[in-house]
Image (cartoon, coloured by chain):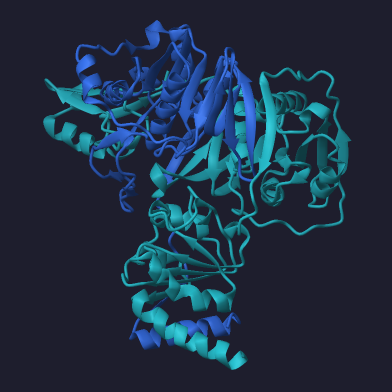
Chain colours: A blue, B cyan
Amino acid sequence: MLKIITCIKQVPASSQVEVDPKTGVLIRDGNNVKMNPYDLYALEASFKVKEMKEDVSVHAITMGPPSASSVLNEALYMGADDASLITDRRFAGADVLATSYTLSQLIRHIKDYDIIFCGKQTTDGDTAQVGPEIAEFLGIPHVPYIKKIVEVKEDSIVVISGYDLYDEKIEVKFPCLITVEKDSYVPRLPSFRRKETFKTYQIPMISLKHLEDQDPEHYGLSGSPTQVEEIFPPNKKMESKLLEGTSKDLSKAMFDILKESKYV
Amino acid sequence: MAYIKVNQDKVTKDIADQLIDICPFNAFEYQDAYLSINASCRICKMCVKKGPEGVCELIDNPKPKIDKSLYNGIVVFVEQHQNVAHPVSFELIGKAKELAKKSKEEVYALVVGDDVAHIAEEALSYGVDKVFVYEDQSFKDFNVELYTNVVEAFFKKYKNNVFLYGGTPMGRSFAPKVAARLKTGLTADCTMLDMTEGKDLLQIRPAFGGNIMAKIHTPNDRPQMATIRYKMFDKPEKIKPFGEIVYEKVDDISKNTTINILDHYPKPKVDDISDAEVIIAVGRAFKKQKDLDLIEPLRKKLNAEIACTRPLIENGWFDAKKQIGLSGRTVKPKLIINLGISGAVQYIEGMKDSELIISVNKDKHNKLFDISHYAIVGDIYEVLPELNKMVDQILEAKR
């Protein structure tokens, strides 16, 4: 049996966050959350492997507060066979390194896997680093930004990976981690029938006490080498000339600017 | 272990509500007169700093401090593909030299590949103190496993303070693997870097989708690492080289890999907006694709590249390579004309360093105006036709 683990994340539905310039407090727009859009492609790539080969299982995992299990339900309704949530207050304040380490510990706890799929990045963190760091903590190779799965063999997978100047056809042996480029495959919608099937499914909650490494110093803020020293609004100060008037005046003004700077 | 402690004896319903309001991550739960913090907490310390005094407290057992004086030198990883260096690496050398002046350190370039002496020479000409070269046939193509082994060996030998990588697809895949190998921090896509005299690297990047900047540091781990997007910093002038090239031994570096690169397909050369000198960027104010014809006379006259915002990519009007912004390209042209763009922060981060910024928008209060040298309050559907008339006259006159 070919075993796939797919990492997903719950993110804020909107990235409209601002800093109150007086108090320095973050102002967040509502409490709405959704599945990280890039993870939909990771899930879809997992389901593609299922279509390409017999006897494949997909296990969706996430880290977050208990309420984050809603993205796992979504994954189950889309096509995942199992799901696990890793949650613990002691994971609070984790940066990329500590987050990746925690997820790698969860994956070690699940034990059996051939391929791990991750989205390319998240919309809230935007780092694209967690996938490669999980792979390193598991001591397995990773292939980034895949656009296409060419072939799934007995002990390896052949994919097309997209870099800026070139695409690369690459074969990697199991176990491996793959991050999936957006628009690689069209993500399917959750199915009502699957929702019925998973009605009684209880998502297992994993916490620090289940993990191989139970030293709290390796998790959360304590396990994070980077720390946010300060947050501040983007710098907006600069010399700006505001021009108003009729369209004729404005186009004339614009023409003059271009002329003055020798573009026309 | 670090955590936020809530002093329950000071908690009232009122105080709980205040704290629930302050927390950007909805981590507080108030039930049965008990205020608890759930796993959503990111220890941003907002509740400690901005909340009612003495209610929330950061508990942190200090770890043994590392000796920072043992780590020296700012290393720029020089990215190469088919034996051509990526220009972002030289931009980073320029920045590294600025940083090194503050911390009084040396600047090194790290070159990995096969037959890359010319890249080492090139790096030297930008004024680094030393170029370290790891050459081997198996390093010819970028292989994330082997290259990680090289950086690991290099760091173990020289104990460097800082590593900088280009925020290219390659750098963004490779640097995190190195970070996990060396168990250190890595800040992605920094837009600014600064250095303290104590050799602490300040890494500044947009956070929370880009509307906020975060200043990040690595207080007690080395090396300090960051990736930086192409065109964030200026490429330095070439100078008379004064440094030296050091060829490192590669025999002891493991070349085992389960990755097999089967083929490369160069992407067809498209008009790349990231190298354009003049750009006309269009946004959502264009109602129909046909209306883009309005910019044609100006485009011809300025010999400009056309670029766009994310919504127009989503409309299918342009190829994704034409998108400016954090999820698209970063551009730094001599002139950019923004037409009907309201300026999401992601967009602004992708073009804010352009030399001359002219923006036309109906809405006087759009964010792009704040960073524009000329902010023209007008409707593109009215201003452009008038402007085209003037441009046409010039084109006519020349004929």
Q: Residue at x 39, y 26 (%)?
A: A8
Q: Residue at x 40, y 31 (%)?
A: A39
Residue B379 in the image, given as x and y percentages of width and height? 33, 76
Residue B19 in the image, given as x and y percentages of width and height? 23, 35
Residue A227 in the image, given as x and y percentages of width and height? 48, 33
Q: Is residue B202 left or right of residue B120?
A: left
Residue situated in front as seen by the camera: B304 or B333? B304
Task: Name above or below for residue B74 compared with residue B2.
Answer: below
- Is residue B358 among the parts visible in the rendering? yes
Quadrant holding the C terminus of chain A: bottom right
Task: Name above or below for residue B256 compared with residue B196.
Answer: above
Query: In which image quadrant can residue B270 be found?
Result: bottom right
Residue situated in front as seen by the camera: B69 or B379? B379
Query: In which image quadrant can residue A35 be found?
Result: top left
Residue A152 in the image, given as x and y percentages of width and height? 55, 20
Q: Is residue B148 left or right of residue B130?
A: left
Q: Residue at x 34, y 16 (%)?
A: A83
Tally of numbered tags: 0
Q: Residue at x 87, y 49 (%)?
A: B242
